[in-house]
Amino acid sequence: MPRHKEEEKREIMSETRSLLLQAATEEFAREGYQGANINRISRNAGFAKGTVYNYFDSKRALMLDLIEEIASGHMEFMSQQVLQKDDPARRLEQFFAAGFAWVTDNLSRGLVLFTTLNSHDMEFKTRMYEAYLPMFNLVGQDILAAGIEQGIFRQVEPVSTAALIMNIYLGTGSQVNERGEQWFPAKQVSDFCLQALRA
Amino acid sequence: MPRHKEEEKREIMSETRSLLLQAATEEFAREGYQGANINRISRNAGFAKGTVYNYFDSKRALMLDLIEEIASGHMEFMSQQVLQKDDPARRLEQFFAAGFAWVTDNLSRGLVLFTTLNSHDMEFKTRMYEAYLPMFNLVGQDILAAGIEQGIFRQVEPVSTAALIMNIYLGTGSQVNERGEQWFPAKQVSDFCLQALRA
Amino acid sequence: MPRHKEEEKREIMSETRSLLLQAATEEFAREGYQGANINRISRNAGFAKGTVYNYFDSKRALMLDLIEEIASGHMEFMSQQVLQKDDPARRLEQFFAAGFAWVTDNLSRGLVLFTTLNSHDMEFKTRMYEAYLPMFNLVGQDILAAGIEQGIFRQVEPVSTAALIMNIYLGTGSQVNERGEQWFPAKQVSDFCLQALRA
Amino acid sequence: MPRHKEEEKREIMSETRSLLLQAATEEFAREGYQGANINRISRNAGFAKGTVYNYFDSKRALMLDLIEEIASGHMEFMSQQVLQKDDPARRLEQFFAAGFAWVTDNLSRGLVLFTTLNSHDMEFKTRMYEAYLPMFNLVGQDILAAGIEQGIFRQVEPVSTAALIMNIYLGTGSQVNERGEQWFPAKQVSDFCLQALRA
DNA sequence: TATGAATGAGAGTTCATTCAT
DNA sequence: AATGAATGAACTCTCATTCAT
């Protein structure tokens, strides 16, 4: 039962830890992992230099925890938004709309996500991909397979097509300026995909 | 005749520079810009520590030169491949086929390209985008506009659609393992786009 | 009461800084600014390599702080010594006597002073000259003008003569061996100047 | 007989060597010994990087040769100028007039002289002092002793007073801006000394 | 004699991490 | 739990010097 362990984690998730993760998000987003300065994170969170090390074993451990936190928040939001709709086509539109909105509303988290997926650090990439596995199911099952079954989408291979759509989301959603404005409208991208999938 | 000797020297000069750029490509691909070690580049190219600085003013200048070299080589190859075909649909297929093949054959160059486009360094990003501007024309004019005119593609807006297709190429093409094997078959991606564009 | 603890900390901070400045004085005196080795300063002060950078932004900033520290100490000592006397002639004697004694007692500081005034670094020179401006007033007003008014000295132009006397002090005072022994006796120099000034 | 050796030197003193010394003078004047760049000297002299090493064993040897060249030229000029006059007082005036003029006309040489005398490098200082020994005789014998004997000057100790006057020359003569304009007029300084020496 | 590519020791500086308080 | 002084490995960059041509 992982339940027990998770509760322990929640308890440890003190406000200090939360402030540190917040500051870390902004630092990693602005400077990248290698360029990030641990002492600056601590000070920007309102604490002294050494405080990060009371909560995280190392810079690397802090990054790994941050990856989990970002991915789980993103995942939860996306499932909740997508499953509000019943029609698979609407779900796909909602997938892009919610996905783009999340980036705009979570700009620093988004930057950490996108650059981690393009980083050279296999441990970070792997951790991020693992955390996003449920989203493959969301797209593959709850959108694509459902749409194919209902005859709305043509007979595409759900798994690899889900990967392609995820990839298109991550690629287009990352094109965002420092004020959170997207370069691609969500509608343009979802329409493109809907055209490609229409029966 | 000093002409002979001078040319020989120029060639040796060029060869050293070329070896350094080659080593730099691999280093930047493996470690990223920040993680790259200038002395290691020099040694991996077969020279002593300081030799890079006989050819490049700084780590940053080396990276900027490398960006130009990668982009121009990639651009040239892509134009040449795409324009071999006459039919716009075949050109789009060729665009992805050649693009994916280039990544496989230029693995380190590809990694530098993809991570630069996702980096936090505006100077690098800008330089890379500028170098890739001709590719927007290639996709927008020689593929999309041509296809629309011939009634093969539906009436999409060529500029933003070109950007979207470029984005899809860069997103999918970057999914490649360390042996150069693509996660997405080029055909799957070009078919997806052709479906989305069909009249 | 955190007051107590904070003051202790401040003191420790000050002591480290003071030790670093002390070591820097000796290093700059022995090697000159360019030849000085920042890591050696740190180690000679009893700390590890990087510790200087906890207290000074750069080698240059350290030098600038040192210039201020040396000049202000020297200035304070000279004013206090010279103004102990009332007679302008005695003040001039005291000026050289105290000035030479300060060099002997502050050998490294003196070397930094003299070589900075002869360096090629305009920022250092300017900073040093600015810090020594009050000494021009001391010589020009409290010694020369006072002596002319009292009829002890002939009618020389006080400003340029003050500059000349300052210059003679800096030139002769810098002739000192590594044990602090002056090549010129202070008395010889002050007598020379008194002869030149006598009415 | 050193005559033989000197002739050899003259022969070796090719135009290339002379051009290198000229460029070295300007480089050492502008940057100081430590800041000087050997390759820049070579290029500014119109040669390639390594050429200095065909004429001088090392940077240090180049500096030592330059010291000799500067001092001998300066010495020769000063003797010739001073001994044009017969009256000791006129000789002292001429000493400062010619000395200041030499600095103005040999700005870079002057800067090298002054900074070498204030450097931390005992080998350089010693070499410079040795080269200037004849000037002590010039001042001590041909000016001071002559003047004392003729009753023009009071009975000062010639050796240490010569040192003092030399020191005053070096101190005041070094106060010169980058266009060669002196901060002290030669007449002011020689008048000050003449007042101090008058019987 | 002149060249200039190559060398590699050494310097200033950064910063993740430790630990005594 | 929080602090921040201290550490020292690691990195970029400089440049005196060598040497094959």
Image (tube, coloured by chain):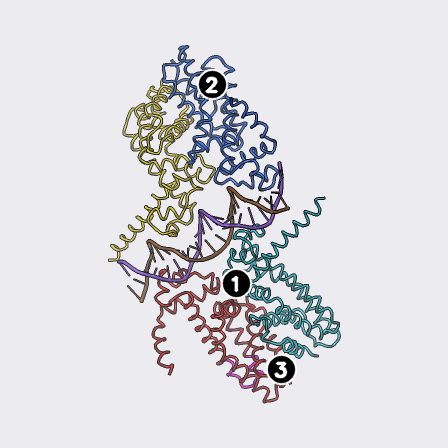
Chain colours: A red, B cyan, C yellow, D blue, E purple, F brown
Of A187 and B131, nearer the camera is B131
Q: Chain of mark 1?
A: B
Q: CA distance from mark 3 to mark 2?
A: 102 Å
Within 10 Å of the Cα at label 3, are there few (<14), some (14-19), or many (20+) other Cα atoms?
Answer: many
| Secondary structure category for the residue under label 1 | helix
Instruction: Kindly report which numbered mark, 2 or 1, lies closer to the viewer in this rendering.
Output: 1
Q: Chain of mark 3?
A: A
**Residue A89 percent location from the top left of the image:** 58, 83
Q: Residue D93's mark?
A: 2
| Secondary structure category for the residue under label 2 | helix
- A88 drawn magenta: yes
Do the dots labelled 3 and 1 sit on one chain? no
Amino acid of disc 2: Glu
Do the dots labelled 2 and 1 sit on one chain? no
Does the magenta stretch mainly form a helix, a strand or a loop? helix
Within 10 Å of the Cα at label 2, are there few (<14), some (14-19), or many (20+) other Cα atoms?
Answer: many
Q: CA distance from mark 2 to mark 1?
A: 70 Å
Answer whether labels 2 and 1 touch (C-beta < 8 Å): no
Within 10 Å of the Cα at label 1, are there few (<14), some (14-19), or many (20+) other Cα atoms?
Answer: many
> Quarter of the image holding residue C139?
top left
**Residue B195 percent location from the top left of the image:** 66, 79
**Residue A131 percent location from the top left of the image:** 47, 76
Q: CA distance from mark 3 to mark 1?
A: 37 Å
Report which residue position mark 3 lands on.
A197
Magenta stretch bounds: A81-94
Of C10 and C62, nearer the camera is C62
